[in-house]
Amino acid sequence: MTLDLTAELAATRLLAVIRGTDTAAAIATGTALLAEGVRVVEVALTTPGALDAIAVIRATAPPGSLVGAGTVLTPADVADVVAAGAQFVVTPAVVDSIPEAVRRDLPVAVGALTPTEAYAAVRAGASVVKLFPASVGGPAYLKALRDPFPDIPFVAVGGVGLAELPGYLAAGAIAVGVGGPLVGDAASGGDLDALRDRARAYVAATS
């Protein structure tokens, strides 16, 4: 049965983006996020040992959690992340990995910024469109983008802090994707206790 990524994100309203410089720290970050109630996490392939991190996090994830791969650019990347156990993929733009993900029935969140890119993403088979970087235009831009595309499920990603989060949800985002403001330096060996505190705050803000 195909995973309905749109419904999952609409229900949880939060996607945690893990991008770091250390495999073990990325694993610890993902484990901590899931333990604190974050249900959907993405490990960027720019993280060293990302495939190993995805495999370990997925193997230990609580029931109902989703573990995906980010910065998935090529068909070969798709094959690699599927082998690691990724349940969905995320791209930064309309890229070559999308047809392969669609062929494999793997949900894909496609990065787009402009109306043309958003439309192209949906035409290519995106489950959701990742408005990235959302901070360029803010919630007002998202609202304007949704006017001609009311049926596109947008996830706002890029510079979404706790203060900005309500604005994006009010503007119609089904969820927000958060990297730095949530993960901080935890995926590079930073403070996991501080990460847990931030995770609880984000879960509370999207509940």
Image (cartoon, grey):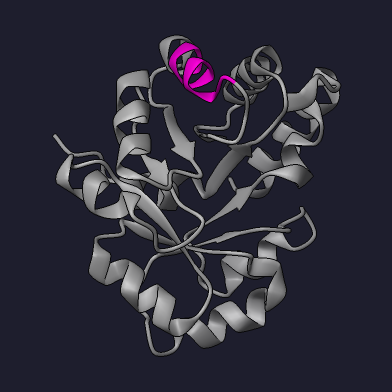
**Residue 114 higher or lower than 90, as above or below:** below
Toward which corner of the image does residue 140 lie, by quadrant?
bottom right
Q: Quadrant of the N terminus?
A: top left
Q: Quadrant of the C terminus?
A: top right
Above/below status of 25 relative to 124: above
On screen, residue 56 above or below 71: above
Residue for point 63% across, 65% down: 133
Q: Is residue 191 left or right of residue 135?
A: right
**110 left or right of 42 in image:** left
> Taking the image as drawn, is residue 16 in sight?
yes
Residue at 59% x, 39% y: name it.
16
Instruction: Note whether residue 151 is visible.
Output: no
Residue 51, position as x, y percentages in the image: 47, 21
The residue lying toward the viewer, choosing from 152 and 53, is 53
Q: Is residue 50 magenta?
A: yes
Q: Is residue 74 left or right of residue 207?
A: left
Residue under the point 29% across and 68% down: 122
| x, y percent for residue 69 | 45, 35
Q: Please tell me whether residue 63 is drawn above or below residue 101 in the rendered image.
A: above
Is residue 187 found inside the magenta-colored segment of the image? no
The answer to which of 2 and 55 lies nearer the viewer is 55
Q: Residue at x 31, y 21 (%)?
A: 83
Which secondary structure type mostly characterizes the magenta part of the structure? helix
The residue nearer to you, when weighing 48 against 172, is 48
Q: Percent from the top left, x then y, of residue 149? A: 37, 82
Query: How far from the left and from the top, in percent, is residue 201?
Result: 75, 39
- Total labels: the figure holds 0
Span colored in magenta: 49-57
Residue 154 placement, left or right of 182: left
